[in-house]
Amino acid sequence: MPKTASKRAQARKMARVARAHTVAPERPVVRRTPSAKRKSSKPRGFAAFVSNYPWATTIFSLVVVGVIVLILHQQQALFFAPKPKATATPAVQATCDLKTHKCDKAPIMTIDKNATYTATIKTAKGDIVLQLDPKTAPIAVNNFVFLAQSKWYDGTYFWRVEVPGKPSPIDPSGTPSQLSLIQGGSVAKDGNDGTGVPGYSIKDDSPLPSDYTPGTISMANTGNTDSASAQFFITIGDESSFFSKTYVTFGKVTSGMDVVKKITPQDKIDTITITVQTPGTATPGNGTPSSTAPASTATAKP
C-alpha cells in the first residue's frame, strides 16, 4: 500500500512539472473595424432605399417599364412597328385569240360608269350608232366594249333576222314569226358558235328591264340566267310584251335605224368602234367587265 501511494504521488509531481513547462496557447487577437469603415460598409442613398423598401422599388421599375412601352407604342418603334401591307396583285385583263374567237376568261371591269359610251357598228349597208348605258347595265356594257375594242366582233355575222309574218330562222316548224329584230355577233353563219366561243359567259345586270322598245340593244342568252356572252340583238319593233325581264338591255340606237332594217341574214359586222366621253373630252374608250360562267351558245328566244 505505501509503495503504491508513493508511485501515485510521484506521478502527480511529474505531471505538475510537465504542466509548468507547457507554453500556454495564445489568445486570438480580435481586431475591431474602425467606426468609419463600419459606417461605410452599410448601403447608402438609392441602394439603401432599395434595401429598405423593396416593394417601392418594384413599383417604380414597373412604372418605368410602362412609360418606355407607351413611348415605343406611340412612336410605333421596335416590336410596335406596323407590318408592311401586302401589295395587291393587279388584275390581268382577258385576252382573245381572234383566229379561234376564244378568250382565256371573262374581261375584268374597267369601264367608267359615269362616262358616256358610244358604239358605232360599221357594216356594208351603213353605220348603226348606239348610246350604251353603263349605269344601268355595267357588266353588259363592259363586256361589249371589251369585245369591240379587242376586234372580236370584226367579221362576225348578223345571222338572225326576225320579220313578222315570215318564218323564224330558229323555228324549224316554219311558224310565222311575231318578232321584229336582228341578232348579230356570231362567228358562225347560223349563230351556232358552240360552247367554246367566246369561252365564257357573264352575269346578268340587275334588275332586268321590261323595256324592249324599237332600237333597244340587248344581250342574247341561252334562256338561262347568267348565260350571255357575245351575241346581241337589236329590236325593230316593240317587243316588251315578249321579252319582259328576260334579257339585259344595255343601250339604244341613236342613229342608223334605217340600216338596222336593211340588214339581212349573213350580213357582216366590219368593225365596232367605241368612243368614251367624259366632261370636256371625247376619246376612244378602254372598257370591260368581270364575271365568269360556262360558255354557251347565245340565242335570244321569244
Image (tube, rainbow, N blue to C red):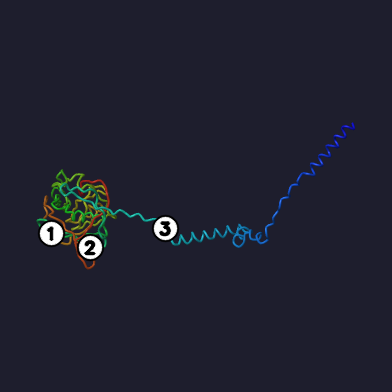
| Place of residue 277 in the rendered image (x, y in percent of width and height, measured from the top left) | 21, 64
Ranked by sequence position, the earlier of labels 1 and 3 is: 3
The answer to whether residue 134 is above or below residue 192 is below
Q: Tell me, yes or no, whether the two marked residues, 3 and 2, touch with CB atoms within 8 Å.
A: no
State which mark lies toward you, 3 or 2.
3
Amino acid type of the residue that numbered disc 3 sits on in the rendered structure: Ala
Q: For mark 2, what is the residue?
A: 116
Residue nearest the viewer, comparing 118 with 151 = 151
Amino acid type of the residue that numbered disc 1 sits on in the rendered structure: Asp
Mark 3 and mark 2: span between their CA atoms?
46 Å
Residue sitting farthest toward the right: 2
Mark 1 and mark 3: span between their CA atoms?
62 Å
| Place of residue 285 in the rendered image (x, y in percent of width and height, measured from the top left) | 21, 60
Ranked by sequence position, the earlier of labels 2 and 1 is: 2
Q: Is residue 35 left or right of residue 245?
A: right
Classify mark 3: residues with Cα within 10 Å, few (<14), some (14-19) or many (20+). few
Q: For mark 3, what is the residue?
A: 81
At x 39%, y 55%, the residue is: 83
